[in-house]
Image (cartoon, rainbow, N blue to C red):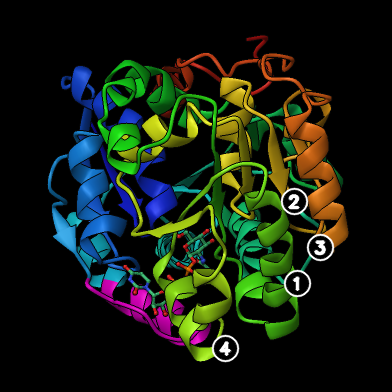
Amino acid sequence: MLKVINVVGARPNFMKVAPLVAAMKRREREFTPLVVHTGQHYDEQMSDAFLRDLELPQPDVCLEVGSASQAQQTAAIMQKFEPVLLREQPDWVVVVGDVNSTLACALVAAKLGIKVAHVEAGLRSRDRTMPEEINRLLTDQIADLLFTPSQDGDNNLRAEGIAEQRILFVGNIMVDSLLKYLERARRSPIREQLDVAERAYSVLTLHRPSNVDDYETFSGIISALAKIASRIPIIFPVHPRTRKTIAALGLSQALEKIEGLTLIEPLGYLDFLGLYGNAQLVMTDSGGLQEETTALSIPCLTLRENTERPITVTMGTNRVVGTDPQRIVDAAFEALERKVSTGSATMPPLWDGNTATRIVDALAGQLVAKTQL
Ligand code: UD1
């Protein structure tokens, strides 16, 4: 029997951990899965709504760390996670993605000699000003098993000198959740509530510090949005960090006066999937949404200078357009004129809804690295 601690902390973790816990619960003779929630995200719409929508069990342990600086938050998670590991003595700690909770929990486990598996390993933006890039680099160095979503991840890990037997290409775990909940999400009343017709609106998300904490960049993006909104309605679920910086930078008025731009509260998993899944265009600085739009063949513009998910560009529907206002407007108009067409993407290999099964097989020792999948 393998005792596995699955770590969740922030919004993008829940859709990655839910299929893993479900797969372990289906194999109750082999696995005892526990869920530890660090509390990095804590608002109802950033956490509980996702637990509910994704049918995750209530966490076995809540560390309740809350928001703080990078160092303080990472340190608080480490301090509170260590006694949990000493008490539970799991066989594996599974961490996902690239948030502070990912690195903090991996580090504590590695130092206690407890095996660590990193799901979504190997992604690199090569931009070390992003806190996530530091989290990725360090987590991958100390984890025992590195589960990659795409083969560029394998190549990055090899180039960093990571031994071949620690790397396993398993596909994209988020697609497991996406495929499982797509039908349910289509029944969400969100489009009626917002009064938008299928494929006749766009969706925007912004929360990267480089975009929303900087006045010049954020106001430049807003000027681009004003032009785009004259052609297509934009629905903007606002991340709490962004909500705060809009107020702090004095940008509320500039946003409010754009006709066609609707600011709403963050949405739960099903409503958000129901919304972006029927959009004509998505504009975002999120990592996960670049992948989710590729999986659904929806044109996506990434408002960043780089991406750690190049496969969404080479095989998918993503275009990395940066934050220059004119470039954003040009790319959006081009996409709306269907020069970037919906349905043109190819699903990347192993984005097939069976990634959790492969990971659980590997944890049980039934699937080993270098196996031809
Ligand atoms: C974090 C992740 C980022 C991920 C994002 C998804 C890191 C370094 N960053 O960024 O990779 O894409 O989550 O959402 O781990 N806040 C609330 N309520 C909450 C959570 C946050 O009000 O439930 C506010 C707080 O003011 C907080 C700010 O948002 O200071 C930022 O939260 P934090 O978790 O530090 O980073 P995110 O920007 O959410």
User: Pointer 2: what residue?
Assistant: 124
Q: Which amino acid does label 4 sit on?
A: Leu
The answer to which of marks 1 and 4 sits earlier in the sequence is 1
Q: Which mark is residue 249?
A: 4
Mark 4 and mark 2: Cα distance apart in space: 30 Å
Q: Nearer the viewer, mark 4 or mark 2?
A: 4
Q: Quadrant of the N terminus?
A: top left
Disc 3 residue lies near ligand 1 with CB under 8 A: no
Q: How many marks?
A: 4
Residue 93: tell me if it is visible. Answer: no
In this view, 207 is above or below 20: below
Mark 1 and mark 3: Cα distance apart in space: 6 Å
The answer to which of marks 1 and 3 sits earlier in the sequence is 1
Which quadrant of the picture is home to ligand 1?
bottom left
Within 10 Å of disc 4 (Cα), the crowding (few <14, some 14-19, many 20+) is some
The magenta stretch is 64-80
State yes or no: discs 1 and 3 in contact (Cβ < 8 Å).
yes
User: Pointer 1: what residue?
Assistant: 220
